[in-house]
Image: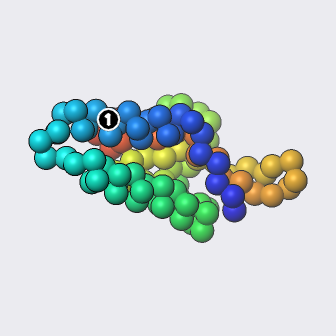
Amino acid sequence: MRILIEERVHQAIESFYDAAILKHWHTLSFDTVENKKNRLYDGLESLANYATIFPKARLKKEWINKGWQEFICEDFHFAYEITVDAHGEKVIVVHDAVHSFLYY
């Protein structure tokens, strides 16, 4: 399955790690952050193989109301849905992301 990641997801990841670097500048290197982000995106790519096994969202009202599923990787929660594009191909659309520290 093809994976589409909405801009909102990229922004959530970037914003979280920008704030983390500012707060923990003395212990958190840019290389460490880049490695974490690379693992996140690798995890999202692996969603193509396992998207059907993850449960529906449990805590965020918006995600619950829209019926999105939830995938957790590297302490980030991702909201996604499996849909079909105009050509009849199944597509995973990742709609939102939030770090565990901010998830409620």
- The local secondary structure at tag 1 comes to helix
Q: Residue at x 43, y 47 (%)?
A: 77
Give left or right: position of 72 versus 65: left
Q: Residue furthest bottom?
A: 49
Q: Residue furthest left?
A: 26
- Residue 53 x/y as whole percent: 56, 64
Q: Residue beneath label 1, please? A: 18
- Number of labelled discs? 1
Q: Quadrant of residue 25?
A: top left
**41, 78: nearer the viewer:** 41
- Residue 28 x/y as whole percent: 19, 47
Residue 92 vertical position relative to residue 42 in the rendered view, above or below:
above
**39, 87: nearer the viewer:** 39
Residue 13 vertical position relative to residue 73 in the rendered view, above or below:
above
Q: Residue at x 27, y 47 (%)?
A: 30
Residue 20 vertical position relative to residue 43 in the rendered view, above or below:
above
Q: Residue at x 71, y 54 (%)?
A: 91
- Residue 86 x/y as whole percent: 86, 48
Q: Quadrant of residue 102?
A: top left
**103, 2: nearer the viewer:** 2
Give left or right: position of 44 versus 33: right
**Quarter of the image where the C terminus is located:** top left
**Hey, what amino acid is under mark 1?**
Asp
**30, 67: nearer the viewer:** 30
- Residue 17 x/y as whole percent: 32, 40
Residue 7 vertical position relative to residue 5 in the rendered view, above or below:
above
| 10 Å crowding of disc 1: few (<14), some (14-19), many (20+) | few
**Quarter of the image where the N terminus is located:** bottom right
Give left or right: position of 55 versus 19: right
Taking the image as drawn, is residue 98 in sight?
Answer: no
Color style of the picture: rainbow
Give left or right: position of 24 versus 43: left
